[in-house]
Image: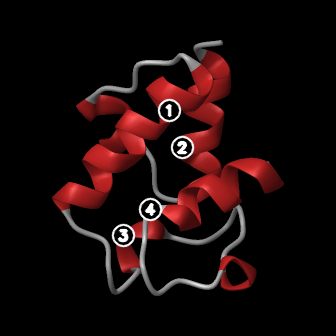
């Protein structure tokens, strides 16, 4: 999970990884937008070989939820 949070934080320019946790509601982040969402989907594919879809993202509320969606497809 820690590695995933680091990779998640790398998507954003101004987010300190120490401010993020599995319980962070990512849609509440100042820099969250549709491009960030697509970047998370691309990161899941590149780093974990998993294809997330729009339903996976809609069903996720926290960073941990995204991680669980990735883990469920591995």
In the rendering, which numbered label is found on residue 44?
Answer: 1
Q: How far apart, in angstroms, are the residues tagged by discs 4 and 2?
A: 14 Å
Are there few (<14), some (14-19), or many (20+) residues within 10 Å of tag 2?
many
In the rendered structure, the answer to whether residue 4 lies left or right of residue 47 reads right
Q: Is residue 40 above or below residue 49?
A: below
Q: Residue at x 34, y 86 (%)?
A: 30
Looking at the rendered structure, the secondary structure element under dot 4 is loop
Dot 2 and dot 1 residues touching (CB under 8 Å): yes
Residue 56 seen? yes
Residue labelled with disc 4 = 11
Task: Tell me which label, 4 or 2, sits earlier in the chain.
Answer: 4
Q: How far apart, in angstroms, are the residues tagged by discs 1 and 3?
A: 17 Å
Q: Is residue 43 above or below residue 26?
A: above
Q: How far apart, in angstroms, are the residues tagged by discs 3 and 2?
A: 12 Å
Q: Nearer the viewer, mark 4 or mark 2?
A: 4
Q: Residue at x 69, y 48 (%)?
A: 4
Task: Tell me which label, 4 or 3, sits earlier in the chain.
Answer: 4
Dot 4 and dot 2 residues touching (CB under 8 Å): no
Q: Name, please, the residue furthest toward the left.
A: 34
Residue labelled with disc 3 = 27
Looking at the rendered structure, the secondary structure element under dot 2 is helix
Tell me where residue 45 appears, x and y as whole percent.
46, 25
Task: Tell me which label, 2 or 1, sits earlier in the chain.
Answer: 1
Tell me where residue 33 appears, x and y as whole percent.
22, 67
Residue labelled with disc 2 = 66
Residue 49 found in image quarter: top right
Looking at the rendered structure, the secondary structure element under dot 1 is helix
């Amino acid at each position: 999970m820690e590695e995933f949070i680091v990779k998640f934080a790398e998507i954003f320019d101004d987010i300190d990884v120490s401010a993020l946790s599995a319980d962070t509601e990512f849609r509440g982040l100042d820099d969250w937008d549709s491009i960030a969402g697509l970047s998370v989907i691309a990161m899941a594919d590149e780093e974990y070989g998993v294809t997330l879809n729009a339903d996976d993202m809609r069903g996720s509320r926290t960073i941990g939820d995204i991680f669980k969606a990735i883990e469920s497809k591995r």
